[in-house]
Image (tube, rainbow, N blue to C red):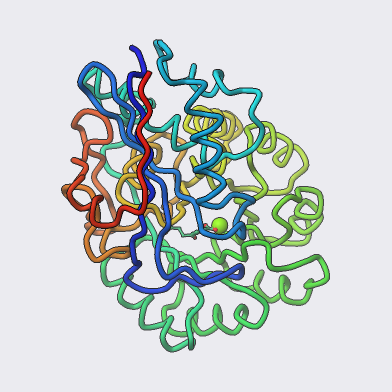
Amino acid sequence: MKIEQIRLLNIKMPLVSPFETSFGRETGRNTILVAVSSEGLTGWAEAPTMSAPLYNEETTETAWHIMRDFLVPRIIGMKFVHPREIPAAYREIRGNHIAKSGIEGAVWDLYARVRGISLSRSLGGTRDRIAVGVSLGIEESVERLLRKIERFLGEGYRKIKVKIKPGWDAHVVEAIRREFGQIPLMVDANSAYSLGHADLFKKLDQFGLIMIEQPLEHDDIVEHAILQRQLRTPICLDESILHAKDARNALDLGSARIINIKVSRVGGMTEALAIHDLCLARGVPVWCGGMLETGIGRAHNIALASLEGFTIPGDTSASSRYFERDIIEPEVMVKEGYIEVPSGPGIGYAVREDLIRRFLVREEVFRG
Ligand code: OSB
Ligand code: MG
């Protein structure tokens, strides 16, 4: 197969409701779609960037620059047999994982479409449906959050994740436990705490949470190991795991007992698969995280979460949780807490280019 054409599309799409974390508030998505074409077929993926470098170091602007000036030139016109040859082609480019994941992902979708099989199958997926949860941001009041939780439990979601930050933590979890009892519940701090918050962690440890996600610094695994030794609740790492090597080191050190795998954070499917395989071999549960992706990015998450090691419900929610109207057909639906893994070729959803046009900010086309 030859990479004949690459298209980058920057779109801005409003979210149905603002999403607030310890690092900031998102009212819409400023994201980049990637379309790679060969032999009359097109593969799609998303580089789910944020406008500001608050989750990782990248922004929509830096990802656009890295893709256009460094990644696309290395693969345009390239002949390949398997998508794992794509990251190898730009191995010397450091970091910029979200940008890389968009490029590699589009080639994975293209590869599956050319073979006429689903992306799930080309990744080695074994499930025909995946259990999912919902990640809920910081709200104006505890009462508002409780009503949201009630709604999502009613829609069947199998895990509730709430964002925490200093001033919005133990009392929130306590209120949730009081109203909803022993629902599958976890918290995500996005690096908002330090080891000095020992009293808070002691409190959180009493609530029977499934896990505490990324409590400490984004680039730390040493202090997480110290904290994990003091807790019964498993720590899950998100921001700290950028490579399979990080996952191995963190598990060796005892920094976490669960790992959140995000294709974008780790720089693409090849690395995501390596982390999955490592954790499966070591009996460490993983789940698929998210970056408020449009349906295109979410379709990749669904395919990835169909692999054997994804034993905990992930953050991949229905289209309606994020957008008024998603850009794929059909939209992602959650029934009784499950999403069906599509069996059609590639991501298995049709891409609505007509809707993408409505949200388009800029587009650039490259030909090999
Ligand atoms: O830390 O998991 C995170 C969204 C944006 C950036 C970071 C995170 C998140 C989420 C939402 O938690 C996951 C989703 O619904 O896609
Ligand atoms: Mg997280």
Q: Quadrant of the N terminus?
A: top left
Front-most of residues 348 and 149: 348
Indicate the position of residue 192 as horizontal and vertical percent values. 68, 68
Relative to residue 138, is residue 189 drawn left or right?
A: right
Indicate the position of residue 249 as horizontal and vertical percent values. 74, 36
What's the residue at 45%, 52% (across, down)? 290
Vertical placement of residue 67 versus 219, above or below: above
Q: Quadrant of the C terminus?
A: top left
- Can residue 237 be seen here? The reply is no
The image quadrant of residue 122 is top left
What's the residue at 43%, 69% (across, down)? 183
Vertical placement of residue 204 versus 214, above or below: below
Front-most of residues 262 and 328: 328
The image quadrant of residue 148 is bottom left
Relative to residue 228, is residue 123 drawn left or right?
A: left
What's the residue at 76%, 51% (across, down)? 220
Indicate the position of residue 138 as horizontal and vertical percent values. 51, 76
Front-most of residues 19 and 122: 19
Quadrant for ligand 2 reads bottom right
- Can residue 109 be seen here? The reply is yes
Indicate the position of residue 52 as horizontal and vertical percent values. 57, 60
Circle count:
0
Front-most of residues 5 and 351: 5
